[in-house]
Each structure stands twice: as structure tokens, then as C-alpha cells.
Amino acid sequence: MMNWKEIDTYAKQWIKEAGKRIRDSFDLELTVETKSNANDLVTNMDRATEAFFYEKIGERFPDHRILGEEGVGAEITDLKGIVWIIDPIDGTINFVHQQRNFAISVGIFEEGVGKIGLIYDVVHDELYHCFKGEGAYMNEVKLPSLKQVPVNETILAINASWIHSNKLVPKERLIKLVSDVRGTRSTGSAALELAYVAAGRYDAYVTLRLSPWDYAAGILLVEEVGGEVTDVFGEKIDFLKKSSIFASKPGLHQEMINTYFSKE
Ligand code: IPD
Ligand code: CA
Ligand code: CA
Ligand code: CA
């Protein structure tokens, strides 16, 4: 029998330790490189943090596998067994420019089913955590179940660049969406944006392209408090693929898909 409470304890301990290493690195010189384009950054701390998890997990749970953004582990093409989906620093641009508003994101899956979600806001020392079926917590304080909210009272997290250009939803629809809601926000860390939906600070979050490490833990958190997460067309998320993501409070979900996103 797999001891999930043991895995949970280690995961919490390691994410906090990794966060402390990142905080301690603020005094040291950072190496910043670009990846696919000038806005796609990676630092020595992104790589070191992923390597830290790889080492800890490998020592303690040698049969677990890791899917991480910086590709420290072997290539993962299925979710058989236990897989840790890790974003060592989500919000690297914020990390480099602001030294805040970034997080470590860890989702742990068994045979493709999410069991544990952890998002650690390193600078604010806020750990969002859920264990499937046992609710979601922020620093050990239970997050209440999400309540319905009408569109005109919604605080929506959305990055303005999607309105300027995207291949999925017509610009006019997105313009109508941002004018119909009460307000829009953009944090610059998908993991934190999903954690904020789980915590009720945002009512909804929409983005037109993310990778599994950006959303794995966040989806588990939002679902654990009764929120809904699909792609923008209402389809279930495949945790191995890039996808659009629409997370929201219950009730709001289908209405927003029908009104603003569906292809009709
Ligand atoms: C990015 C952040 C950002 C989102 C990007 C992601 P990274 O992750 O989550 O909010 O808009 O699509 O790539 O690269 O900082 O880990
Ligand atoms: Ca990145
Ligand atoms: Ca990310
Ligand atoms: Ca990252």
C-alpha cells in the first residue's frame, strides 16, 4: 500500500525548503538566460530548484517519476504510477524583475488522478495545499467551498496579451468579457492565479495556453473547493498536454463558456 500521508509530509517539507533556498538566493547574483524567445526566461534558480526536487524524490521515492518544466528528469509521455508535475518557479519574469509574485507548483498524480496539490508563494510564505477528498488549505487554514457569483460581480484574472492576439477565441468576445465583469487582474503566475481562485480572491481565471506544470497543482486546488476547471470550450484537461485553461466558481463556468468562449 502506498503511504500517501508520508508522500504528503515530504512534499510539504521539500517545497518549504526549496522556497527558503530561493529566498536565500536573493542576496546572490542571478544568471538569467532566454529560452524560446526574449520573454521566455530561465534562471539558475529555476534549474537548481527543479534539481533539488529531483534529488529528494529520487532518494526517498525512487520509483516515482517527475515531469518538470526545465527537463531535469527523463521525458514523461504517460501518467502511469506516481508522477510529480513540477514547476520550480512559476512566474520567472516576476522572480527576475520583482523578487515576488512567483510560486513553486507541485501536483502529485497516481495513475493520472490528482492526489496532492501544492503551490508555495515563496516570498509571502503562503502554502496552498490540498489532499484529494480532504479539502484545500492555505497555511493550514481550511479554504471555504466556493460560492456562486454573477458575471457582473466577477473579478477575472486574464493577461491582456490574449486580447491582442490568440488563435482560439475571437477578440470581440474577449473585449465583451472584460467589459462585462467587475474587474480584471493579472498576477503573472498561473499557479498563483489558480491558487487565488481556490482561495476566493479571484472568481475566475482564463488563459489560452499553459503547460502541465503551470496548471497541475492549481486545478487540484480549485476542484477541491468546488470550483470548475476545463479548457475554454468546456473539455476535460489532459495533464500531459498544453491547453487553454478556464477555472471558475461553480455556476459561472458553463455560462461564461456559452457566452464568451464557445465556437457555436
Ligand atoms: C508562466 C507563468 C505565466 C503564464 C505563462 C507561463 P513560467 O510560467 O505562469 O503567468 O502566463 O504562460 O509560462 O514560465 O514563469 O514558469
Ligand atoms: Ca518558463
Ligand atoms: Ca510556469
Ligand atoms: Ca517555470
Image (cartoon, rainbow, N blue to C red):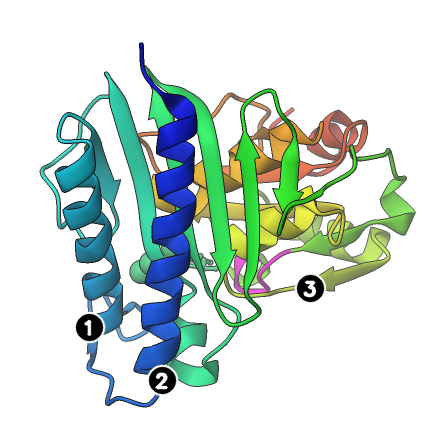
Q: Position of residue 228 (x, y in %)?
A: 66, 29
Residue at 53% x, 22% y is 235
Where on the picture, by quarter, is residue 85? top left
Query: Which of the two labelled residues, at mark 1 and mark 2, occupies the earlier sequence position?
Result: 2
Q: Position of residue 40 (x, y in %)?
A: 30, 67
Q: Position of residue 59 (x, y in %)?
A: 13, 40
Visible residue check, residue 101: yes
What label sits on residue 185 in the rendered view?
Answer: 3
Residue at 21% x, 37% y is 66
Label 1 crowd bin: few (<14), some (14–19), many (20+), radius 10 Å: few
Looking at the picture, which amino acid does disc 3 mark? Arg
* Vertical position of residue 234 compared to residue 193: above or below: above
Looking at the picture, which amino acid does disc 2 mark? Phe
For residue 183, side relative to residue 167 (left or right) = right
Camera-nearest residue between 39 and 247: 247
Q: Main secondary structure of the magenta part?
A: loop
Q: Say whether mark 2 is within 8 Å of ligand 1.
A: no
Residue at 62% x, 24% y is 134
Whole-angstrom CA distance, mark 1 to mark 2, is 12 Å
For residue 37, side relative to residue 162 (left or right) = left
Looking at the picture, which amino acid does disc 1 mark? Asn
Please report contact status of discs 1 and 2: CB closer than 8 Å, yes or no: no
Q: Position of residue 153 (x, y in %)?
A: 90, 50
Visible residue check, residue 89: no
Label 2 crowd bin: few (<14), some (14–19), many (20+), radius 10 Å: few
Whole-angstrom CA distance, mark 1 to mark 3, is 29 Å
What label sits on residue 26 in the rendered view?
Answer: 2
Range shown magenta: 158-162
Please report contact status of discs 3 and 2: CB closer than 8 Å, yes or no: no
